[in-house]
Every structure is written in C-alpha cells, then in structure tokens.
Image: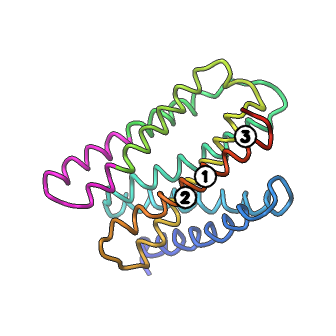
C-alpha cells in the first residue's frame, strides 16, 4: 500500500464517519450532549477529510478535488468560527485569519468559474458543475468578507452567527453527501447526482434557518 492509497483510505474513512455523525447531529436536539458530541465528531472528521483531499492533489494533480477540498474546508471551519463567536462571553472582532480565509475562498470560486469557462469551450458538460459550485463558493466568501467588516460582526448573540453556523454545517454535509453519491452511484445524466444534494439541501437549510429565526425571535 503506497502513501497515496493510505491517504485515500483515511480520507474516505473520515468522510464516512462524518456522514454518520453529521446525521446524528442534525437529528439530535440542538444544544444537548448528543448534538454537541456528534457535532464535534463531525467537525473533526470533515476537517481531516478535507485536508487530506487537498493533500492528495499534491501527490496526484486533481483540480476539482483541490477546489472542492478548499470549499469543504471553508464550510466546516466557518461553521466552527460562527458557533464559537455565538457562544463567546464578550464582544470580539473577526480575526485577520478569518478575513484572509474569506479572500482565499473568493479566489477559489473565481478559479472554479474560470475552469468552467474552459470546459464550456471544450464542450465538456461538467463545466455546469464547476460554474455552480464556483458561484456558490465566491458568493459565500464575499458575503463573509462584507459581514466581517460590519460593526455588528463583533457582537455575540447576533443572529447572523447562529444562522451561519447552521448554514455552513448543512453546506459541508451537502458537499460530503455529494462526494459519496458521485463515487458510488452511476446515473445518466451524471450532473443530476452532482447537483441533487445541493438542491434538496438548500431547501432544508433555508427551512431550518427560518424556523430558528422564529423560535428565537431573531427577525
């Protein structure tokens, strides 16, 4: 077993653990012990899986895996940033690291869109997938960059942090589910497998965000 095979195995295993623990976190009552433990398990599993995905591209170049790895890493990290800020005891401004991380993900999204243009020129249908994820990635980073510059971003218990946590956790789960389905299901046209989790997941995340807004009277 060579190094690449070992990294791939750990990457897949961490992703599988993430799928299971993430499902438990979503079903468990928010804030209780089961939710917190499964949520932390999910975070670390997906952190390892995303970092290894990026590392794998250093051994065998895979532009898509690299970009999706960065996308997933940003999702899971900002979800953790958001809940830590929400739970903070005092006000604090987003760090320079978070701002630079947002800048990096904007660049990643732009690169995705650039790759999409190239694929469209080559009449490659997968360009549709790149343009979709590229727009989502760039918009997510830009939205965060704008938010971090606002005075309200330093305040704890601001609804934006809680909704960000919910959305990013859900978004990272969508990415993990997509990766699992793409590698295990053959379906024509293939772009349906790529985009179906995003379509369904976005509806569920929006619904959950609206419910929490109403529950906590945050609107």
| Residue sitting nearer the eye, 60 or 199 | 199
| Residue sitting nearer the eye, 193 or 92 | 193
Is 124 included in the stretch rendered in magenta?
A: yes
Q: CA distance from mark 1 to mark 3?
A: 12 Å
Disc on the earlier residue, 1 or 3: 1
Secondary element under disc 3, as helix, strand or loop, is: helix
Image quarter where the C terminus lies is top right
Q: Position of residue 139 (x, y in %)?
A: 44, 37
> Where, by quadrant of the figure, is residue 113 drawn?
top left
Q: CA distance from mark 1 to mark 2?
A: 6 Å
Is 173 drawn above or below residue 76 in the view shown? below
Q: Please, which residue is most extreme toward the left here?
A: 122
Is 74 included in the stretch rendered in magenta?
A: no
Secondary element under disc 2, as helix, strand or loop, is: helix
Question: Are circles 1 and 2 on residues that touch, CB within 8 Å?
Answer: yes
- Alpha-carbon neighbours of circle 2 within 10 Å: few (<14), some, or many (≥20)? some
- Alpha-carbon neighbours of circle 3 within 10 Å: few (<14), some, or many (≥20)? some
Residue 128: mark in rendering:
none
Disc on the earlier residue, 2 or 3: 2
Image quarter where the N terminus lies is bottom left
Q: Position of residue 53 (x, y in %)?
A: 46, 61
Residue 201: mark in rendering:
2
Is 183 drawn above or below residue 22 in the view shown? below
Is 36 drawn above or below residue 117 in the view shown? below
Q: Which residues are magenta?
A: 108-131
Q: Residue at x 53, y 46 (%)?
A: 74
Q: Position of residue 137 (x, y in %)?
A: 44, 44
Q: Residue at x 37, y 67 (%)?
A: 192
Q: Which residue is mark 3?
A: 213
> Where, by quadrant of the figure, is residue 196 drawn?
bottom left
| Residue sitting nearer the eye, 25 or 58 | 25
Q: Which residue is mark 1?
A: 205
């Amino acid at each position: 077993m060579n190094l690449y095979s070992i990294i791939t195995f750990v990457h897949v295993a961490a992703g599988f653990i993430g799928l299971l623990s993430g499902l438990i976190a979503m079903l468990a009552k928010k804030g209780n012990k089961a939710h917190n433990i499964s949520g932390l398990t999910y975070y670390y599993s997906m952190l390892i899986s995303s970092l290894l995905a990026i590392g794998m591209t250093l051994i065998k170049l895979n532009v898509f895996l690299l970009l999706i790895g960065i996308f997933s890493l940003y999702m899971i990290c900002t979800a953790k940033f958001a809940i830590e800020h929400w739970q903070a005891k005092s006000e604090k401004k987003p760090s320079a690291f978070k701002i630079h991380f947002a800048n990096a993900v904007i660049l990643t999204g732009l690169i995705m869109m650039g790759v999409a243009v190239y694929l469209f020129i080559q009449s490659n249908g997968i360009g549709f997938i790149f343009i979709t994820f590229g727009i989502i990635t760039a918009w997510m980073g830009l939205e965060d960059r704008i938010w971090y510059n606002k005075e309200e971003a330093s305040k704890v218990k601001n609804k934006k942090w809680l909704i960000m946590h919910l959305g990013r956790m859900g978004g990272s789960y969508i990415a993990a589910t997509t990766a699992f389905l793409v590698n295990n299901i053959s379906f024509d046209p293939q772009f349906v497998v790529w985009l179906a989790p995003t379509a369904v997941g976005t509806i569920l995340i929006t619904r959950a965000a609206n419910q929490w807004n109403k529950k906590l009277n945050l609107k």
